Amino acid sequence: MLWTYEAGDSIESSAAIADGAVYVGSMTADLISLELETGKPRWKYHVEEGIEESSPAVHDGMVYVGDLPGVLHAVNAADGKKLWTFKTGAEIKSSPVVVGDRLLVGSYDGNLYCLAARTGTVHWKFTTSSYVHCTPAVSEGLAFIAGCDEMFRAIRITDGKEMFHISSGGYNAASPAIAGKAAYFGNFNNEVLGLNLATRRVLWRYEHPERHFPFYSSPAVADGKVVLGGRDKIIHCLNARTGKALWTFTTNARVDCSPAISAGRAYVGSNDGRLYVLDLATGKKLSEFNAGGPLSASPAIAQGKLVIGSQDGKLFCLG
């Protein structure tokens, strides 16, 4: 452990690291910026109510994050001053994504919004039939969302037109991961899906043979492997092509944290309060860190450091 920071309330927002600084949201209703090297506070930006699962996006000197009252905030990365805000119709748990001069974010009002990144002006909104909890994935000019309406949708970023949709067969809270012409995500029907984006069909469905629990964690994909956590307390590694289980690792509580993969290792937090470092090839535990509180936020890795927040309000920087 290199440093810790006490936020004062739960951190379920995954940190962003950019230009030597850390940005993270907290249920104290603060967007917080710290120095990556020292953990020294740079600034705080206060919102009306908590920042829960929406994680900051940093681009071109601006930081974007959503809050529980449904407001998207654009803040100056240098000093934490408000640049603009945009109000949606319900809470924002989706994390904003910047694509060129545009910004995408989902809301519990059922819409995916596309805004001008510099001004917050609405380019378009796409309306689904339920919450948009997930963070959009972007590839080849399309935004992909796995919605709470049990649909996986591809939406053209230029004009908000739906290009296609595929029924997932279950309520989707996790964000999709895109690798090549395939998409991967888990659902509340206790399944992980692999989709072929070229044929617009389901490649495979994975369900643990014995333990049937929802998947809230979003997958990480690397080296032909799909890694994600389950509410069955298990970290699952699947073959990206076939959906067959390559290995599993059992923790002591549910795993809502979305893994990060770096240098052949998978880093995953669990609600048992531990961050696990696993060998990506074998699933063997290489090390663990006991944070002392549930870890549902995902790890951020940059410059040889890992930053993760806990539900007891602590932000950790590990080397």
Image (cartoon, grey):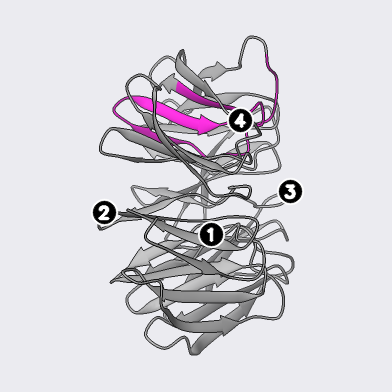
Distance between mark 3 and mark 4 Cα atoms:
26 Å
Kind of element beneath mark 2:
loop
Residue that label 2 marks: 304
Crowdedness near tag 3: few (<14), some (14–19) or many (≥20) residues, C-alpha within 10 Å: few
What number of labels is visible? 4
Instruction: Tell me which residue sits at (70%, 19%) in the image.
Output: 212
Residue 239 at x, y percent in the picture: 40, 18
Going from the N terminus, do you reach mark 3 or mark 1 first?
1
Front of the two marks 2 and 1: 2
Q: Which residues are magenta?
A: 211-237
User: Does 225 lie within the magenta span?
Assistant: yes
Up the image or down, 223 lies above or below 104; here it is above
Residue 76 seen: yes
**Mark 3, residue position:** 129
Which residue position holds label 1?
95
Tag nearer the camera, 1 or 4: 4
User: On the image, numbered disc 4 is attached to which residue?
Assistant: 230
